[in-house]
Image: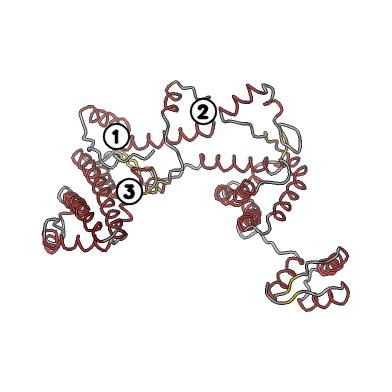
Amino acid sequence: MPDWTEPFHLPDITDDTLREKQRDYVEKYGYRYSIPGFDDVFHLGFEKPITDDEQLIWKRKAYNELPPGRYEELKYLKEKKREKYLDLLGSPQPEVFKNRGSIISSIDDAQDAMSVAACLGAVVAKTLPKVLGKAILGPVGWIAGAAELLDLATTYITPERRLIQEKRVRDQLTDQNPWSKKARLKRARNLSKAHIGYGKLLEAGQVTKDVFGYGISLGTVMNLPLDILTGAARRALGQPVKVKYPIPDVKIWQKRILKGLKALVLNQNMGSNPRLEEYSAELVLANLGPQCISPYLSSWNPFDQVDDIAMIESEAPTPTNILTLEVIQEEDPSGLDSIGWPTTGRKWSSIYDIIDTSHEQTTQKFQEYCQANKHDFKAFVAAGNAVEGMFYSLSALEEEGQLEYDYTTMCKVIHSLLNSNYRFPQDLSTEQKSCFADFVQSYEDQGICPSTYDCILYAKRYCGFEFIAGPL
């Protein structure tokens, strides 16, 4: 749920208890600070915050009541919070700067929220009739003025911003002073135009991060220079300072991706006549999965690291959702014992056996999907993802530049005909199709490809049909 009050909070001032914990941590481990990574700046909201029910489960340490995927996710969130807390305890900044940073953060969050609210109000006023628009611009202007006042306040509590030239000081006292005539005219002009610049977009991103959980956070980036300077000063004094670099924790993502690809193998072999929405999503996963795991395979190739990998046995996916497990226990207590790979009928099967028993059914299912949805654009995109996914899967298992692939002669012939605005007639007989297919296969056997002219001439002379010329 959105938390609309999150941008408005009081600063966290260091008290005696926290001061003592910081002193004990530094004496034992030394100072530390972290270089912000991608996840620290861009919050995409992939991990859902812990719910009230999950908090109760976590306090009871009843981890088996959580789905394995969710348990891994909560552990990941816990470690992220641990890193932030340790950075707080081991920060090399003097206490006055720590408190100042908290005050700046509190003011900046409120200023961003007010600025975005004023900008949205100006956009709404722009779309309304003039009478209503002018009535709204009044309160919106006061909100914008308060936002600029908060922004001005931050410049007077940041010493590094005091090192400015006289011209900028005069500008602050005139143009940037929210009460000056020049600033009021500029603010009124911007509100009337409902102008949205890059600055407003950055502020909006920070507000959505506080309210909805996804957006951007520039606080860690803005605070980094002071960490570096104070950390260097303490290191020069002989005090230990550790720097934590943003090495990504790929395990949680890797497990999710591998789990999805394993489920994909299972779903691809469960019956025919696939549903459009579900099967399309599976084909997109078949493309995205290999792309995500290929960076990890570049330094660890399973064919080189695992002996006789085709005979390694894999366990069939088992339900992990607690509700699904309860239903199975209530309705069919022995249901979990019958879980296995659909094509082998066994719970544990080698990779070779799974491929050997499923490739025909998987190919047939894909062909049925393409035929049944050949006029659907979403299916066309999904089928393209399946082809691209095959290339990425092969390239992920080989060194870069080692993979070469080519189209079959039939594909080349069809592309050549279509590019020349020729297409097959709809009423071809089986004999005519076989005649033309044998002609193309004869070239395939020689490793060459017939020209468009040769295809048109052969079809007319020997197969008894003519290609339809012209656009559709």
Residue receiving disc 2: 66
Q: Say whether marks 2 and 3 touch (CB < 8 Å).
A: no
Q: Horizontally, is 344 left or right of 252 in the view?
A: right
Label 1 sits on residue: 89
**Residue that numbered label 3 is attached to:** 206
Quadrant assignment for the N terminus = top left
Q: Is residue 111 above or below residue 455?
A: above
Choose between 115 and 407: the one closer to the eye: 115
Mark 3 belongs to which amino acid? Gln
Q: Of the numbered discs in the image, which one, if any, rests on residue 350?
A: none
SS under mark 2: loop
Q: Earlier in the sequence, mark 2 or mark 3?
A: 2
Rounded to the nearest angstrom, the CA distance separating label 2 from label 3 is 32 Å
Q: Amino acid at mark 2?
A: Leu
Residue 205 appears at what percent x and percent y? 35, 51
Sequence-wise, the earlier of marks 2 and 1 is: 2
Q: Left or right: 186 with respect to 380?
A: left
Q: Nearer the viewer, residue 251 or 39?
A: 39
Q: How far across and down, in percent of the image, does residue 348 sit?
A: 71, 32
Residue 399 seen: no
